[in-house]
Amino acid sequence: MASNQQRQETSMRHVLSFDVEEHFQVSAFWSDARRRQWDRLESRVEQNTLRLAELLAHAETKATFFVLGWVAERYPGLVKALAKQGHEIASHGYGHELVTNLTDGEFRDDVRRSKHILEDLTGGMVFGYRAPSFSITDRTPTALAILAEEGYLYDSSLYARFQRSEKVERESGVHEIATTAGNIFEVALPTANLWGIQLPIAGGGYFRFFPYSVSRMFLKHLEKAGTQLVMYLHPWEIDPYQPRMDGPLVSKFRHYFNLRRTEQRLECLLRDFSFAPVVEIVQPIREMVQARAPYGTAACAVSG
Ligand SMILES: [Zn+2]
């Protein structure tokens, strides 16, 4: 496998990210009854995340891990190990409730709580946030201001999947967004324009759905156009043996489709593209991070 160093010489570097949560916490299977059972369901997140870390180590690649506060409380050693390996630790909130379902006060508590837990564990600062199921939308107009007030430097939740292309042009890539609490960076998920509609190609179920050659074609096309990719996956997506949950047929299809193929596809992705954490390769964020934490922090891989 080509080393990260070799790949960097030939291609641009992109963001690789993982949303660290249990297989039973996904929004597609959400119910209040299941939420009450979380502590009794079979946990798979630690072993799956460690496997991801192994794959990354083999490819000499670092990534951003958006970790759920609920997971960090139960697996503090996992978060510490990821930070020690040089990965960036960012927040996926605490309890995986959709932002659209929370009041402003509840959202603030959720993002504050997870940030404290992660910073206590790593001894470093947490700069980034990603909403469960990309649920920062037009329906959550105060969310970005709350993130800025709570000390987050960037958000990575905007995903213009299936929206009309002319509407999202200005919202793609890394850009700064003004809020009532000051500016915050948005590390938006990339989409590919297909006949005027933005096709999601950045990871998750879409990455499992399309054959790898198709994903690669879209991603290489975006790369050639100068787009910095932001890819995402979840630890449970490399786990074909996870227990099956009951739920709507569509949810079952989306969640369980092609789980057997994800690990191999991730290896192909790591071979064909060069990746690094947000704080390391998104230039304006890197500069802000270095200004705030000039000596580096345990929570992020800011080097060089
Ligand atoms: Zn999630």
Image: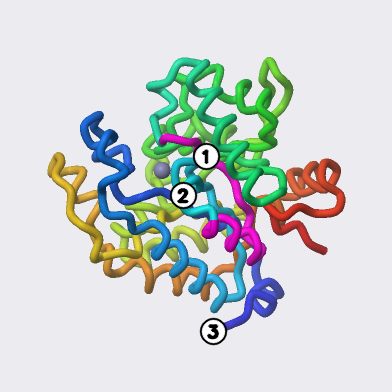
Quarter of the image that includes the C terminus: bottom right
Q: Which residue lies most toward the bottom here?
A: 1
Q: Residues within 10 Å of mark 3 (few under 14, many from 20)?
A: few
**Ligand 1 closer than 8 Å to label 2 CB:** yes
**Picture colour scheme:** rainbow
Quarter of the image that includes the N terminus: bottom right
Between label 2 and label 3, give the one nearer the viewer. Answer: 2
Q: Amino acid at mark 1?
A: Arg
**Inter-mark Cα distance, 2 to 1:** 8 Å
The residue closer to the viewer here, 240 or 280, is 240
Q: Which residue is mark 2?
A: 19
**Ligand 1 closer than 8 Å to label 3 CB:** no
Q: Say whether residue 84 is left or right of residue 58.
A: right
**Residue appearing at x 63%, y 58% in the figure:** 83
Which of the two labelled residues, at mark 2 and mark 1, occupies the earlier sequence position?
A: 2
Between label 1 and label 3, give the one nearer the viewer. Answer: 1
Specify whether residue 243 is painted magenta. no
**Inter-mark Cα distance, 2 to 3:** 25 Å
Residue 62 in sight in this render: yes
